[in-house]
Amino acid sequence: MAAGNSTGGGEVLHTDTNGKSANNNSLVVSFGEFLIDFVPTVGGVSLAEAPAFKKAAGGAPANVAVCVSRLGGTSAFIGKVGDDEFGHMLANILKENNVDNSGMRFDHSARTALAFVTLRADGEREFLFFRHPSADTRLHESELHIDLIKQAKIFHFGSISLIEEPCKSAQLAAMDIAKKSGSILSYDPNLRLPLWPSAEAARKGIMSIWDQADLIKVSEDEITFLTEGGDPYDDNVVMKNLFHPNLKLLIVTEGSAGCRYYTKTFKGRVPGIKVKPVDTTGAGDAFVGGLLSSLASDLNLFQDEKRLREALAFANACGALTVTERGAIPALPTKQAVLDALTKHHAS
């Protein structure tokens, strides 16, 4: 794992194994929600049946930032938490994982969001959110760390921050700053239907920024939802409904089966790595983190299919390793662990 040396002003400087500083032109900045997940101490139960809960840091954009850092990259997180014990705990988790947290803000009146999450016996995840209101929705445009956003080689975001103001305006402003500064815009809609007022609002909200992204990652379920019942395996459905003229890369994740990729000039599929799943939380975020860490050091992946396929195999392995342990952040792999898994996979 890359050693992180803290310098002044909240900057985090990474050194690689050769002791060279990784320069900031490979910075991945992640924007959005950061919360506390409460997960049952036993698997396969409903929330009502759970005997006890264990707390863990959650929130897709934060998971992605930690993943990039753990893989040896440079990352930062921008978002708001409550000025409470949980909020400060989350800020410290980022610091411990060498993620620049200078873009985090603390709200004095709203609490850090909580989510109770369980994997039922039928394999479905069940969510119960406590965020009325929660601090992550209270981030104002005036609180954005503009210099940090301008440094981003990749600016990554989701759709949950679009649900409520003032956070929605803050996200749109941050995307605009990043775009004008030459950042690649990366979007993982990360559909959480219970958080939206209605399915229609979710569809509309998620699609409202679709054409601004350079890179989009969607799951099969999200394709069916966004296309109102379209077949996620039909290339025509995907290209007609979800590919836009400015898009450099569209990724469709298929869980343990791997992923598909679509660009203007080529498309294909990269199979996944078979593992014994323990907890699927954070697998998609680890996939995104793995892909963004490759992309941050090599933007030519968009044009070079061979190198893109290698980066996607790496991302698949990141996702696979994450499901072998409980919790998202504790389970995120190091670069060496991913390379070892790929070597083992190719040898079998």
Image: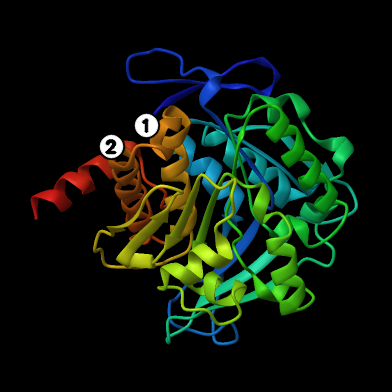
Q: Earlier in the sequence, mark 2 or mark 1?
A: 1
Q: CA distance from mark 2 to mark 1?
A: 8 Å
Q: For mark 1, what is the residue?
A: 1
Q: Residue at x 51, y 61 (%)?
A: 218
Q: Residues within 10 Å of mark 2 (few under 14, many from 20)?
A: few
* Residue 54, image x, y percentages: 54, 65
Instruction: Give the side of residue 162 with respect to residue 8, left or right.
Output: right
Q: Quadrant of residue 134?
A: bottom right
In-front residue for pair 65/234: 234
Q: Residue at x 42, y 67 (%)?
A: 235
State whether residue 3 is above or below residue 254. Answer: above
Tell me which amino acid carries mark 1: Met
| Quarter of the figure with the C terminus | bottom left
Q: For mark 2, what is the residue?
A: 336
Q: Quadrant of residue 60?
A: bottom right
* Residue 170, image x, y percentages: 82, 45
Residue 100 visible at all: yes
In the picture as drawn, the residue positioned furthest to the left comes out as 347
* Residue 293, image x, y percentages: 44, 36
State whether residue 21 is above or below residue 219. Answer: above
* Residue 107, image x, y percentages: 85, 47
Instruction: Give the side of residue 236 with respect to residue 316, left or right.
Output: right
Instruction: Give the side of residue 105 with respect to residue 100, left or right.
Output: right
Q: Residue at x 57, y 67 (%)?
A: 241
Tell me which amino acid carries mark 2: Gln
In-front residue for pair 11/204: 204
